[in-house]
Each structure stands twice: as structure tokens, then as C-alpha cells.
Image: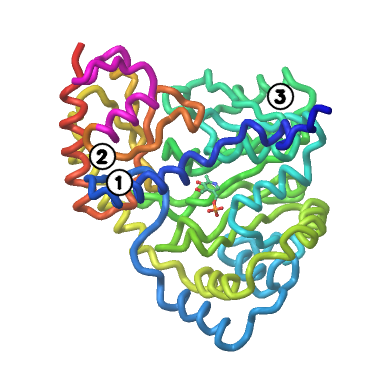
Amino acid sequence: MQPLERISAKLFKFQQSLTLSLKHLVELRDAQNLPVYDFGLGETKGTLNPSIREAGERAFREGYTMYSDPAGMPKLRQAVLRWLGLENHYGIENVVISTGAKQSLFNIFLAVCNPADAVLFDAAPWVSYQPLAVAAYGFPVMVLPLGTQRELLKVTADDLKRNLDARPHVKLFLINNPCNPTAQLYSADEIEALLSICVEHKIYFVLDRLYWRILFDGRTYPEPRIDEETKPWVIQVDGLSKNFRRTGGLRIGWAVGPTDLTKAIINLQSHYTSGPATPTQEAALAAVDRTYVSDFVEELQTKRDLLHRQAAGMPHVKIWPTPGTFYSFWDVRDCFGKKTPDGVVISNSDDVANYLLRSEGVITASGMGFMQNGYLRLSFSVSEDQITDGMSAARRALSALKG
Ligand code: PLP
């Protein structure tokens, strides 16, 4: 008798998240004492803010280790509304705290998708959107930018409309602003135009705003319009991982949206995680329930400037502007067709990333993980020394390409 498939068809093709496997690569090179300049994983570093640490410690000391509300602690949900400036628009019933923004996104896909409903993503979707949508039986589609913003891979309202007109079963459009991997920021007008199209077509507008505090050169965040017309359709996802130092592993994220949707998510979450760990919710509360200190953003801006200075004139690379996030996005298509010193012809961004790694220990995230062959993403959430030495190493490697 033929055994049944051991792994479902749905998960069979899944690979480990590209960015998390990069972390493993760094550990391997470190263990072998090989040089490594790690621009791969998008993780915040530095020292955890003492008030966040103490809140977590206190929770353990004082025994806040029992189950909390499956939607998350009410005081944290209220604080999240204040953090997002949404306390006049929503109540805590509209907020669900989850185990990282990843789970918030997965909850949304699970809550809204029937099999084969299409979910639309922007042109360079973050690595986990598609696997999460597929695992929720959604059908992921990238909106191809053909409009005025295509040079920066930004989707315009016309691009979105074209896709919606062509597909009857779209459930949601998801946008990440500012965007991982491209670092681009949609303006308030662009957001409003995209949101209006979603409202008009009665599909959800999911805004992943995980990096929303990390904006440079005095920019402010382009908030989506929240009123009676848009409220049934807007879902905002955010979390602890990126806007603070060293908080990725605390695994707290949240979603804010219409009551029917959050209710469905809370019911679901009550069955599969019972909500995130209580001590880390206490830590999250300490993070968001106070005035945001922007020295972290200033530090990242200094690093962005350093990286762009050190990378100026890098052979075969065009470097995009970085208005926000901690990513530098590189167009490396000029490397295609060139030969490495050991005779390998570069034909895609994986090849460029592999070459930089093998020759000089420079770790980057290949654009292939974001459905964008021809690009690399570099995280500059690293030390200034790593930036200076890593850019010299990248320059040595790229200068050695022939042809
Ligand atoms: N959305 C984007 C755009 C991200 O970059 C990430 C993490 O890298 C996530 C969501 C998931 O965040 P979390 O670590 O909170 O699960």
C-alpha cells in the first residue's frame, strides 16, 4: 500500500525563511573564524532598554506567568492604541496582541481567506507574506508596478485598480510602509489613493507598519485615514521587533482592525496560542507606554549615512535612497553576465550574494527571497566598524568581477 504523503502538499515546498537562515550562516562562519560582515538579517541590536528589561524581570519575580486574555492583556491593548495614536478611533476590542507581527499577519490571512481567495502584495513582498498566505489557503499575487513609481517598485492606485479589475476573488491588499526590503516610503497621498481603491472595491487594506518609527531626515509617518468609511476595511499590523533595540526575540506583535475581524482572530488565537507569553507582554507595555525616544532612529540615520558614504561609487551597483527602515537596497543587475575570479558567470542575485559571501564574507539578503531578482538588501543595523570594513570588502569583491 502506498503511504500517504508525510508532509501536506501545502507545506511540502516550504523552505526556511531566507532571513532566518542567514543567521545560521553567520554562526557557521563565526565558528570557523572566517571574516564575516553581516548585513543579512534585519534585526535590531544594541542594549535592551532597562525599563523593558525590568518590566519583564518584574513579571517573572512577581509571578505574572499565568494565562492572560487570549486577545492580549487589556492594558497593553489600550497602550497599543495610544502608541499608534488610534485611541479616539478604536477600543481594545479592536486590538489583538500576538506572538510577533508574523502571527498577526497569519491570523489575518486565516481569518479572511477562503481557499484560493487572492491576496495582493506589493512588488517586492517581504519573505514571509507568501508562505503565510499559502498556509492560510490564500492565493498570493504580486501587483506589478507599471506606473510612475515603478523605478522604486512602488505600486500606484492605477496598478492596484488594474489588478482588482482583472480578479474577482481578491480579499485584501497588503502594503508594508516603510518597506522591507526596498526601504521606500509611500507618501500620505499615495496611501490615501491606494486605500480609497480598496474601500471602493470592498477589500481589506492591510498596512504592515512594523518599521513606522524608523524614518529619517525629519519625515513623519503617513497615517492612513480612519473614519466611518474606511474603518471596516483597514487593518494595521505592528509590533515590538523593529522600533526598539534588541526586541526581536520578545515576539510581540499586534493587529488593529474592525471588530468582526478582531473577534474572529481572538476566537482563533484562543485555540492555538492562548495569546503570547505574559512576561513579554509586560515588557511590551513598558516599551510602548511611554514617549518614544528617538535616539535609536538617530543612530540608524548615522549608520545609513556612513554606509552610503562608504559605498559611494561601488562598482556594478546602484544604491537606492533610504528614507526609512534600516535597509539599503542595491540594484546589482549590472553584475549579471560578469565573471568572478574563479570563472563563475553571475546570472542572478543569488549568485551575487553567494559571491560576496564566499569571496569576502559579506552577507546580504538576495532579492530572490523578495521576488526581485536583480537586487540585494543590506541591513545597516550593525556596528559602524562592520559597515566600514564590510563596504571595503564588498568593493574588493565587486571590483574583481570581469567582463
Ligand atoms: N513584517 C515585516 C515587513 C517584517 O520585516 C517582519 C520581520 O522581519 C515581520 C513583519 C514580522 O515581524 P515579527 O518579528 O514581529 O514577527
Image quadrant containing the N terminus: top right
- Could you tell me residue 364's position as x and y percent? 35, 38
Element at label 1: helix
- Proximity of marks 3 and 2: CB atoms separated by less than 8 Å: no
Q: Nearer the viewer, residue 107 or 38?
A: 38
Q: Magenta residues, as a range? A: 336-358
Of the pair 159 and 103, the residue shown nearer to us: 103
Question: N-terminal of the two: label 2 or label 1?
Answer: 1
In the rendered structure, which disc, 3 or 2, sits on the residue that comes first in sequence? 3
Q: Is residue 316 magenta?
A: no
Residue type at the position of mark 2: Gly
What residue do we see at 18% from left, 37% from top?
393
* Residue at the disc numbered 2: 361
Q: Is residue 125 left or right of residue 244?
A: right
Q: Position of residue 327 (x, y in %)?
A: 37, 43
Q: Callout 3: 10 Å neighbours few (<14), some, many (20+)?
A: many
Q: Give the label, 2 or 1, closer to the camera.
A: 1
Q: Is residue 273 left or right of residue 400?
A: right
Note whether residue 199 is visible: no
Secondary structure at badge 2 equals: loop
Instruction: Please identify the quadrant where the C terminus is shown.
Output: top left
Report how far apart the C-alphas of labels 1 and 3 lie in the structure.
46 Å
Whole-number angstrom distance, CA of label 2 to CA of label 1: 8 Å
